[in-house]
Amino acid sequence: MQQRNPYEPPVAGLTDIAPPNTQLGASTHLPLVPRVAGILVATSFALSVIRLYLIPDWSSPLPPFIASLLFLSIGWGVTSSIRKARNWVRWIIIVFGLICLFDLPRTLANIPSGLTETIEALQTVLLVVAAILLVLPSSRHWFRRTTQA
């Protein structure tokens, strides 16, 4: 027969309990830089809906209303993930920002073509600025506060 363990289990006090996905003492208030980046990404997705209705010959299998709901739901998901400090969303925005940065000269060259090209250029600039904001140290600190990737 085995002897019982002579040691007492540790007792957790109420001060050791933290909300899920946060470190003790970490602020849950969204800092200015990630908040502005989220607003820029949301504006970019809202502009995609406006641009969708300005295209005269919509040749997609999705009706414009369904496509606009899809764009708005993706935009809402991305901005809420920034609010929840999901680091994977930060890296996706940074990668798409780099892709937009390489595409920026072509996009800016097409601005005189019309309103849809101007909106596309504005979307590209907004996404590049949001990616730059998400690389800043205050953003890194915000996304580092969680334990999830």
Image (spheres, grey):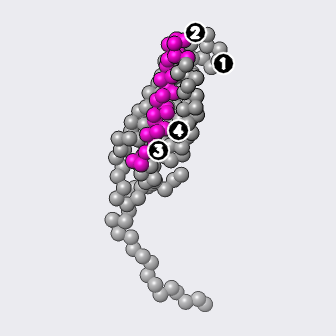
Q: Earlier in the sequence, mark 2 or mark 4?
A: 2
Local crowd at mark 1 within 10 Å, few (<14), some, or many (≥20)? few
Q: Earlier in the sequence, mark 3 or mark 4?
A: 4
Q: How far apart are labels 3 and 2 at the CA level?
A: 37 Å
Q: Amino acid at mark 3?
A: Val
Q: Residues within 10 Å of mark 2 (few under 14, many from 20)?
A: few
Under circle 3, the secondary element is: helix
Amino acid identity at mark 4: Ile
Real-space CA distance between mark 4 and mark 1, rounded to the nearest whole angstrom: 27 Å
Residue shown at the point (51%, 85%) measured from the top left: 5
The residue wearing badge 2 is 56
Q: Residue 12 is drawn in which quadrant?
A: bottom left
Give me the disc on residue 61: 1
Front label number (2 vs 4): 4
Circle 2 SS class:
loop
Start-end of magenta stretch: 110-139
The residue singled out by tag 4 in the image is: 93
Quadrant location of the N terminus?
bottom right
**What residue is pinned by disc 3?**
135
